[in-house]
Amino acid sequence: MHEMSLAEGIREIVEEAGRSQGFRRVRAVVLEIGQLASVEPDALRFCFDAVMKDGIAEGAVLRIDVMPGSGRCMDCGATVGINALYDPCPRCGGYRVQATGGTGMRVRELEIE
Ligand SMILES: [Zn+2]
């Protein structure tokens, strides 16, 4: 389960933002997670609550926006929307779709008090 290390990464980003921007309390963290990022939102929420304890985002709400996945088909050359890695191309049915979007995760917004 890599959600724990992702949550620790989020904590570092949040604490660093607090230090550089001078706020002490975060009410909500808004995350963008790509549909192809292999992140389990429920597992991440669980880890988030545990990891944020005793920090500036303790008890903060975690909001997750899932970004759609997209890829480029190596067979027909089309750029297509895909729901999972290794999904076939919806145009030609080929399995050589290279993921190009929705593969990452980032902190988009912090709501502070
Ligand atoms: Zn194709």
Image: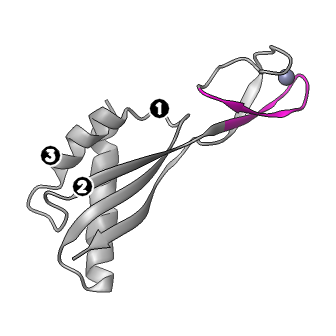
User: Residue 38 shows which numbered tag?
Assistant: 1
Q: Residue shown at 22%/41% (left/top)?
A: 47
Where does the image place residue 5, in percent across and percent down from the top left?
31, 44
- Which residue does the numbered mark 3 point to in the structure image? 50
In screen coordinates, is 53 left or right of 80?
A: left
> If the picture is divided into quarters, which one holds ligand 1?
top right
Q: Residue shown at 20%/59% (left/top)?
A: 60
Q: Is mark 3 within 8 Å of ligand 1?
A: no
Q: Magenta region: which residues? A: 70-83
Q: For numbered disc 1, what is the local secondary structure?
A: loop
Where does the image place residue 6, in percent across and percent down from the top left?
34, 46
Q: Is residue 71 magenta?
A: yes
Foreground: disc 3 or disc 2: 2
- Which residue does the numbered mark 2 point to in the structure image? 61
In screen coordinates, is 57 left or right of 6?
A: left
Where does the image place residue 41, in percent across and percent down from the top left?
35, 37
Q: Residue shown at 73%/35% (left/top)?
A: 71
Q: Residue shown at 72%/17% (left/top)?
A: 88
Q: CA distance from mark 3 to mark 2?
A: 12 Å
Sooner in the amino-acid sequence: mark 2 or mark 1: 1
Q: Is residue 69 above or below residue 24?
A: above
Q: Amino acid at mark 3?
A: Ala
Q: Amino acid at mark 1?
A: Ser
Q: Amino acid at mark 2?
A: Val
Where does the image place residue 62, in percent across and percent down from the top left?
29, 52
